[in-house]
Amino acid sequence: LLQYESLEKSQQKRILTRSSFLARSRKFEEADKYLVLSQKDLPETERLQIDLQRIRVFATAAQWKPALTLIEKLLTSTPEDQKLLATGIEIALRLNDFDKAKRFELTLSKLELEDTFQLRTLRIRRLLASYDQTSLDEQSDLTRQIDSVRSERPRWYPGDRKSTRLNS
């Protein structure tokens, strides 16, 4: 690592690599502290990558709440970041925060997406995870969404545990 750091010219890449090394060594708190401190030395344009790395470190450590808090903070300055919104949905679902997942989903659905497949699968996951709390309209929508995904990706169906739960 020291040799790499002496050769790498990009400070941002050195920071990302060191934090990855720390996270892989299960030193999550140290990795996060390093990222926070190192971020101060970077220009504003490079700080987003450091924050995204912090989210990855939190996710690797299964620290979902701080990851979601950071995503929400980042979305205040980049509210139409599709990757952040999708990641926010994923993490909100892990926390069973269905309202927050739905809010991110609605924001994502208002954007012009080249491909809506990921959005639809995230919606399906949210509706399945919160099935007991969904309205009849949402349950009907869930069935339509699953049928749509099945028609686009027919090979996914036989191994789809979630759709089995819906049909039982």
Image: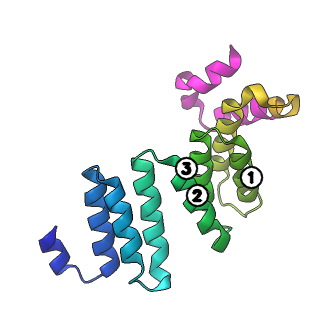
Closer to the N terminus: mark 3 or mark 1? 3
Instruction: Determine crowd level at label 1: few under 14, some 14-19, many 20+ residues with C-alpha closer than 10 A.
Output: some
> Is residue 14 left or right of 66 when viewed as pictured?
left
Q: Secondary structure at mark 2?
A: helix
Q: Position of residue 98 (x, y in %)?
A: 70, 41
Whether the magenta-drawn stretch holds residue 127 is answered as: no
Q: Position of residue 140 (x, y in %)?
A: 83, 30
Q: Is residue 54 visible?
A: yes
Q: Is residue 81 visible?
A: no
- Mark 1: which amino acid? Arg
Q: Quadrant of the C terminus?
A: top right
Q: Which residue position holds label 2?
A: 69
Decide: marks 3, 2 in contact (CB < 8 A)? yes
Q: Nearer the viewer, residue 144 or 132?
A: 132
Q: Main secondary structure of the magenta part?
A: helix
> Is residue 56 left or right of 102 when viewed as pictured?
left
Q: Nearer the viewer, residue 155 or 20?
A: 20
Distance in Å between CA atoms under marks 3 and 1? 16 Å
Instruction: Determine crowd level at label 3: few under 14, some 14-19, many 20+ residues with C-alpha closer than 10 A.
Output: some
In the displayed structure, 21 sits above or below 92; it is below
Distance in Å between CA atoms under marks 3 and 2? 6 Å
> Is residue 95 left or right of 50 when viewed as pictured?
right
Q: Residue at x 24, y 51 (%)?
A: 25
Q: Which residues are magenta?
A: 141-168
- Mark 3: which amino acid? Lys
Q: Residue at x 63, y 49 (%)?
A: 89
> Is residue 140 left or right of 129 when viewed as pictured?
right
Q: Residue at x 38, y 74 (%)?
A: 37
Q: Which residue position holds label 1?
A: 103
Q: Which residue position holds label 3?
A: 65
